[in-house]
Amino acid sequence: MTDRSVNQEQRRAALLGAAVRVFARKGFHGARVGDVASEAGVAHGLVYHYFSSKDELLETIFRETWAALLAAMREVEESDDAAREQLRKVGAIVLRTWTRDPDLVRVLVNEVTRGPQLQQEIAEIRQAFQAIERIVAAGQRRGELREELDPRLAAVVFYGALEEILTGWLLGELPGGEADVAEAERAVVDIVCGGLDRARVPA
Amino acid sequence: MTDRSVNQEQRRAALLGAAVRVFARKGFHGARVGDVASEAGVAHGLVYHYFSSKDELLETIFRETWAALLAAMREVEESDDAAREQLRKVGAIVLRTWTRDPDLVRVLVNEVTRGPQLQQEIAEIRQAFQAIERIVAAGQRRGELREELDPRLAAVVFYGALEEILTGWLLGELPGGEADVAEAERAVVDIVCGGLDRARVPA
Amino acid sequence: MTDRSVNQEQRRAALLGAAVRVFARKGFHGARVGDVASEAGVAHGLVYHYFSSKDELLETIFRETWAALLAAMREVEESDDAAREQLRKVGAIVLRTWTRDPDLVRVLVNEVTRGPQLQQEIAEIRQAFQAIERIVAAGQRRGELREELDPRLAAVVFYGALEEILTGWLLGELPGGEADVAEAERAVVDIVCGGLDRARVPA
Amino acid sequence: MTDRSVNQEQRRAALLGAAVRVFARKGFHGARVGDVASEAGVAHGLVYHYFSSKDELLETIFRETWAALLAAMREVEESDDAAREQLRKVGAIVLRTWTRDPDLVRVLVNEVTRGPQLQQEIAEIRQAFQAIERIVAAGQRRGELREELDPRLAAVVFYGALEEILTGWLLGELPGGEADVAEAERAVVDIVCGGLDRARVPA
DNA sequence: AATGAATGAGTTTTCATTCAT
DNA sequence: TATGAATGAAAACTCATTCAT
């Protein structure tokens, strides 16, 4: 019935992709395992050949997506760019995910807290924070960024800004076209690095 | 008669309080109506005399909390403070809720997307955004804030920063003691308004 | 829908009775929880108000039946009857269960080994053995029974004989009418106590 | 060709052996076809080249075991031994199976009633009963055994005793070492033939 | 108002069996 | 012969909601 020429890796990827689309559409709890299987064009039982449970499907999506994002962030971190430019690139990595796969972003943003064993994904997210934190701290050491600010809080503020922009897009609160994404990428760094204030106010 | 209605109001409030604690502990989906009832010390059937469904319980928590937050924000907005001070106060309103009722914050943050009538909560949050946006825009008009920045994005960045700080506290990633709350309140405004950059970089 | 005048104890008993009939007809594994509920005329969910699981249904049947049988056996044990008469009475207790409730016997015999946590019921059955063993040992001390025989093995032989007679009845291998039951009751003691041999052979 | 068919026969036997071990360990229902295949070191699909279903696996175990047991019993029946000696030998056949293959006994005893074609196994067991019955009847005709006893019931009692001893060993209630097996073999005949009574009581 | 017995829809997961390779 | 991917039937259990009392 099913095309036997599809190999294991392809099928696994197909199921993961189907899960992202279905979870994005119905939410993790609202989606049935059978929905994911249908979306992938297979019987629901097959899902259990590739993943041990519905939960593992979600976990895998988190793990693999974050692994890719983290790798990209680390590359940025190791570059010789100025802190501001590094932050811009990190912002781009996160925000461009929206352009590449809005469904994925929807799942990532909506289901963060649902993490069945939110252990795993939180560990990954924490690493993202730490990368940003290190970028800020290095910028401070090089005299590019203000030293009196707590790098950890700065990372939280920056990451929160990114996540909220994604949320704005997926809720339709913010325009999310190609140009808007590029604009947001620039603006978020401008705001966080340049500050809202017209005149510099002594901290 | 009066006594009865006072008791009714008290019971309603008790059920809401119980729901907040239980939802915070187990999550909305993980919590059973019976858990809420037990926590409040009544039979589970009684919940349905006060609320039409489990969903309505969550909705009510959202609605009433946001109503209070929004009212407080509007008051800030109508004050004569400078934009920066107004933002500080808005930040304080959001962050201080954590000190007052961590369980409530946990529910608000974790279950945003679970909202049964998602629309409703989005509307509330949008109003918060808009309040911040108006504060920023007014600040720009008065020449306090840089005019080249999109007030809407600025609002998203600021609100995202606040929410991420709450999340950090929730997950235990960020220290959440009394002093830390005060510190975060100051820092978030300092970062967003003052910028991370040491030297002002031309946008 | 359901008659509310039925009280809890009655309903519990009704469910247990329904379970016995259904398990007898379809076997424990072949029976669905819904079958038991239907047989009792209630919705399947209600079963879980009275029993925590399908397994517990079976366990309860074992436990309560054996408790009754054991109580009856202990009474026999405490009587002043001769060993042979005591054994006859114990045999009667076991075999008369067939007359009283053939379905119950069917479940007891067929599902002994299925015991999900065969812990509980085996403890009860062990006690039955021990009661028979004590009866034999007492008979030996009083000089009524041959002393060279191991009372434990004697108990196993006697109990095995009883169980096999029940099995014969429920498989239709042995006639199981009123008179046959009475006859078997007499015969099993005659064989086990009197021996098959015509002439006494020296052990 | 010959090699192939030898291998086929070996594989079939290996699968049956694996099935016995697995069924003994997990019970028939608890065992998966894949477990049997793993135990035999083959893919689960291969089981279906040798047996048409999981049920047939169990059936075959029953059928082949009983065929051997029945053949041995018939040999005993046709000997010129006295009835008592014949019964001892029948007992030995049944009980010695325990020493030879405890797993097999476990399956035979635990899964009797689970038999998919229950009818089949019952037929086999009936033949065992009948063999014992004929031995008793012949003994009565030869004046060795008491004539007033029903040979059919006697057979049930004797077989029940044997089965209960096996069960006792299975559950660890009875010591099952080499010497114990020999002792039980002697004792069961002594009890059933010699009777428990010290003095012969008129029936 | 309050209780909790009763209902029944809903879903994940297991696993025997099939079959293309 | 051998493999294991694929199928899909089947069922226990949960729990929101109702409603007689």
Image (tube, coloured by chain):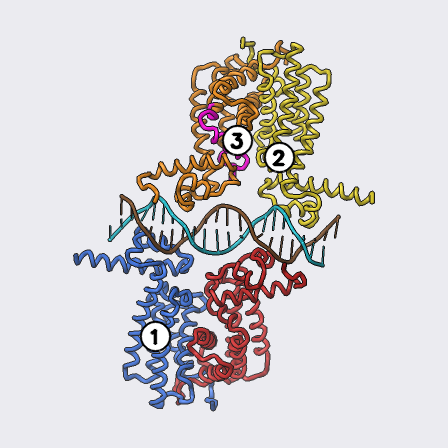
Chain colours: A orange, B yellow, C red, D blue, E brown, F cyan
Foreground of the two, A83 or B134: B134
Q: What secondary structure is marked by label 1?
A: helix
Q: Which mark is residue D7?
A: none
Please indicate whether residue D79 sits to the left or right of residue B187 in the image.
left
Identity, as a three-letter code, of the amino acid under mark 1: Ala
The answer to the question of whether label 1 and label 3 lie on touching residues, with beta carbons closer than 8 A, is no
**x and y percentages locating residue B33 in the rendered image:** 63, 46
Q: What secondary structure is marked by label 3?
A: helix
Badge 3 is on which residue?
A109
Foreground of the two, A1 or B12: A1
- Crowding near pointer 2: few (<14 within 10 Å), some, many (20+)? many
Badge 1 is on which residue?
D92
Q: Could you tell me if residue C70 is visible in this image?
A: yes
Identity, as a three-letter code, of the amino acid under mark 3: Val
Which contiguous range is marked in magenta?
A96-121
Assess whether residue A98 is covered by the magenta stretch: yes
Dot 1 and dot 2 within a common chain: no
Badge 2 is on which residue?
B106
Nearer the viewer's eye, disc 3 or disc 2?
3
